Image (tube, grey):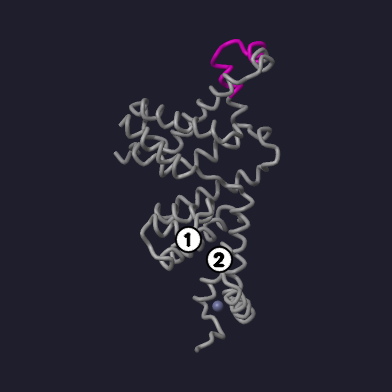
Amino acid sequence: MGEVTLHPEKWVDRYADYLFNYTIVRVNDRIVAEDLISETFLAGLKSKDNFKGNASERTWLISILKRKIIDYYRKKNTQKAQAEVHITYSDDEMEGDWLEERVEDFSDQTAEDTLENKELRLAIFECLDTLDERHADIFKLKTIQNYDTEAICNEYNITPSNLWVIIHRARKALMTCLKKHWLE
Amino acid sequence: MKIKIAFSCKEAAHACDKHQYKECSKSDRMLLQFHLVICKLCREYSTQNKRLTDFMNSSAIATLSREKKEAMKQQLRSYL
Ligand SMILES: [Zn+2]
């Protein structure tokens, strides 16, 4: 049927970083973000029969994650915010909407993090997605997590010159892709 | 002893990549600079490369640690 099927065994490698960046700007706490992502994966696994195959796996996981973030705020909400919810909206469905807006509109969560940067991160992820998975991992380790060349070489059983070829190709591909998605 | 006095484009690109990670030696940086003076293509590559580095830095993109990912995988596997 050409429908999308789920591959839970690949979720962490494929989506964990994306979901993490999505979450961290909304909850502004690394540990909380990590927990929410773990919960999202487990919830996804539990409800995998509900997956209709009409959205991408990532979109589907994001929709679960959004509910998790909303639940998190629901629990964490101050008395004042809760009162506000109950005054403004009468039923649970509507309360969900109110929180959903908060989750969508995350501009007040981390003031120093500009919208431009958030969009840039999304563009980077879109572009990383176009790379070979292993190359993307190596690039991320080297560039984002600042791993030593030697550590990555040991981990992936490659020589430094292999590593630099991979980095070179990844950088070139990313430059081209970002130019398309970001600069134009 | 043979002393290197000029970079090929390939060597220049390699030095430029390393430079993005502050792993380029001083002498290679000099050879790179010389090459960039004479080579427009590598100059363009260098500009783009630097821009990518700036993007990566300014975006404050974050990733989960490998340990955390491994823990998540194990947790998932136990439910599969
Ligand atoms: Zn050149």
Horizontal and vertical percent position of residue A33: 53, 33
Q: Residue furthest bottom?
A: B1
Q: Is residue A108 above or below residue A133?
A: above
* Residue closest to the eye, A84 or A147: A147
Helix, strand or loop at mark 2: loop
**Label 2 to label 1, Cα distance in Å?**
9 Å
- Residue at left offset 62%, top offset 61%: B51
Q: Residue furthest front?
A: B1
Q: Which residue is mark 2?
A: B23
* Residue closest to the eye, A144 or A2: A144
- Residue at left offset 52%, top offset 39%: A20
Q: Does the magenta run of residues contain A91?
A: yes
Q: What range of the chain is rendered magenta?
A: A85-99
Q: Which residue is mark 1?
A: A149
Are discs 2 and 1 less than 8 Å apart at CB?
yes
Ligand 1's image quarter is bottom right
Residue B25 placement, left or right of A136: right
